[in-house]
Amino acid sequence: MPDSHHGSKTFVKFINNDADALAQATHIAEQAKTDAIIRDQQRRYPVELLQQFSASGLGAITLPKTLGGPGLSFQTLADVFRILSASDPSLGQIPQNHFGIIQFILSEGSPLQQQQLLQAVLEGKRFGNGGPEKNSRHTRDVQARIVDTETGLRLTGDKFYSTGALFADILVTAATYRDKPVMAFIPLPAEGVEIIDDWSGIGQRTTASGTVKLRDVQLNPDWIIAQPSADKPTLRGAVSQLIQAAIDAGIAQGAFDEALSFIHSSSRPWIEAAVERNADDPYILADVGRISTELTAALALLTRAAKVLDSIDPQQLSAQSSAEASIAVAEAKILTTDIALRASEKLLEWGGSRATLLQYGLDRHWRNARTHTLHDPVRWKHHAVGNYYLNGEHPARHAWI
């Protein structure tokens, strides 16, 4: 378990522009490379790197200037996650929900809630996700309940896939209150909240995406935000999915970069290739060309999706512009999913049998890709895109589209 940092004071830098944000992300990513294999193999948490992330000011880059933030672009947000995830996608995944929650607050929070909750972000606090429920019918089936008692509002329920909760300052979780869906914000530590690191997935091993038990947890009624109705246009899903796609693009980039290095440094040519270096094998050359092209295409669609989001005025958001954003991001996510899986698998193929040796840790790329791309089924992205262009149907509005 990591040392608790709840309530600690952190000096937080203020990022003024896109270049500064990318420089900070690159600096942290370079440090993350050093022990990435050890962290994966031994399940060591990237606690110090997370603290650097918050202290650098990266956690506040999407806050608008009207609320004290720098108001940076979604393009920069995607680039930050891509850069971090190329070094360690667990480090990239931990704060992904933090930004989705920020978007939710900006969209649904009252002015007072925005001021209070987002001021915490400016001070370097991180939101953590009290995730979906493992034993429910589907991800939107919420069994956690908030009830009125003589001592105030109380929350009880069990959550899983709670990425980032173990490292968070404020836990955010979905619940039902008076038969309506809400999001509850809980400062940590809190009596009745138990966060258990029982995540045992084959990849993304240090995200601590495990269980949160909530037992009669007292809530601040001012820190409960109603979920929007299904007919209200929102960018929450598109922003969340843009980050997901950026993480997958980072996994692909990290696998591809390490593949090129391993081919040169540690792999042997196949005997029938009749070449001195594996880097001169004509079939590997063609394969590398294909993967490079597919990665370039995925990155181009990721950039395009971010630009679509950046082009939308939140004050003028409509059902059509919301749908356009979700579809653009879905198209990007289709390609980033595919290239993350293909690049991480080709890395092992190009390196040969020795690429599977534990000392190299190359298998982590495929395990991370396979695990993270299962967050939501890409087959439904194909369906949403096809239904939009063929039938003019807008995609569903939730955090997974």
Image (tube, helix red, strand yellow):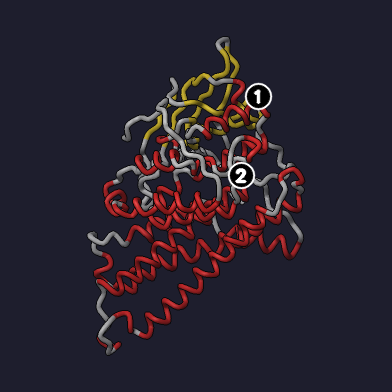
- Quadrant containing the N terminus in the rendered view: top left
| Outermost top residue | 150
| Residue 12 in sight from this viewpoint | yes
Q: Give residue 71's mark.
A: 2
Q: Amino acid at mark 2?
A: Gly
Q: Amino acid at mark 1?
A: Arg
State the residue position of label 1.
178
Rendered residue at 34%/51% (across/down) = 31
The secondary structure type at the circle numbered 2 is: loop
- Tell us which disc is closer to us: 2 or 1: 2
Other residues around mark 2 within 10 Å, as few (<14) / some (14–19) / many (≥20) = some
Residue 350 percent location from the top left of the image: 33, 74
Q: Nearer the viewer, residue 113 or 401?
A: 113
Residue 357 falls in image quadrant: bottom left
Q: Is residue 209 left or right of residue 243?
A: left
Q: Is residue 230 left or right of residue 155?
A: right
Q: Give residue 224's mark.
A: none
Residue 340 percent location from the top left of the image: 45, 63
Rendered residue at 38%/66% (across/down) = 257
Q: Nearer the viewer, residue 188 or 300?
A: 300
Above or below, comparing residue 265 to residue 115 in the picture: below
